[in-house]
C-alpha cells in the first residue's frame, strides 16, 4: 500500500442514493481513490494503489 491509511465517507445525493468515497489525506491534499454507488461490487485490493 501507500503507507497512508485509506479513509472512507458515505454521502447521499438529492435523489436519495448513497455512495461511498475512498480517499487518502496526503499533507493538506485529499486524493480520491474510488467512488462506489448502489449496485456496484465492493472495491477489491487490485483496484487500490500500491
Image (cartoon, rainbow, N blue to C red):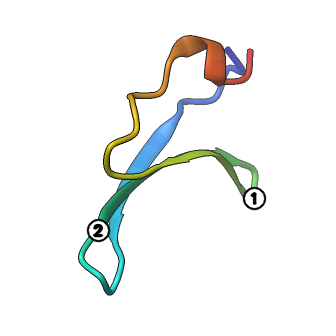
Q: Tell me residue 9's x, y (percent).
A: 38, 54
4 or 40, nearer to the observer:
40
Q: Are marks 1 and 2 in contact (CB under 8 Å)?
A: no
In the picture, the quarter occupied by the N terminus is: top right
- Please count the marks in the image: 2
Compared to residue 22, the image places residue 5 above or below, namely above
Q: Tell me residue 13's x, y (percent).
A: 36, 78
Rendered image: mark on residue 15: none
11 or 2, nearer to the observer:
11
Q: Does residue 45 appear to the left or right of 28 in the view shown?
A: left
Compared to residue 21, the image places residue 7 above or below, namely above
Residue name at image x 53 percent, y 33 percent = 6
Rendered image: mark on residue 29: 1
Residue name at image x 64 percent, y 22 percent = 47
Q: Name the residue that disc number 2 marks.
A: 17
Q: Secondary structure at mark 1?
A: strand
Closer to the eye: label 1 or 2: 2
Q: Tell me residue 41's x, y (percent).
A: 39, 30
Q: Secondary structure at mark 2?
A: loop
Figure quadrant of residue 29? bottom right
User: Rounded to the nearest whole Å, what is the CA distance between mark 1 and mark 2?
Assistant: 27 Å
Furthest toward the front, the residue is: 39
Q: Tell me residue 28's x, y (percent).
A: 74, 60
Amino acid at each position: 500500500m501507500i503507507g497512508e491509511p485509506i479513509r472512507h465517507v458515505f454521502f447521499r445525493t438529492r435523489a436519495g442514493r448513497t455512495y461511498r468515497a475512498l480517499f487518502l489525506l496526503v499533507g493538506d491534499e485529499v486524493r480520491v481513490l474510488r467512488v462506489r454507488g448502489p449496485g456496484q461490487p465492493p472495491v477489491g485490493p487490485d483496484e487500490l494503489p500500491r
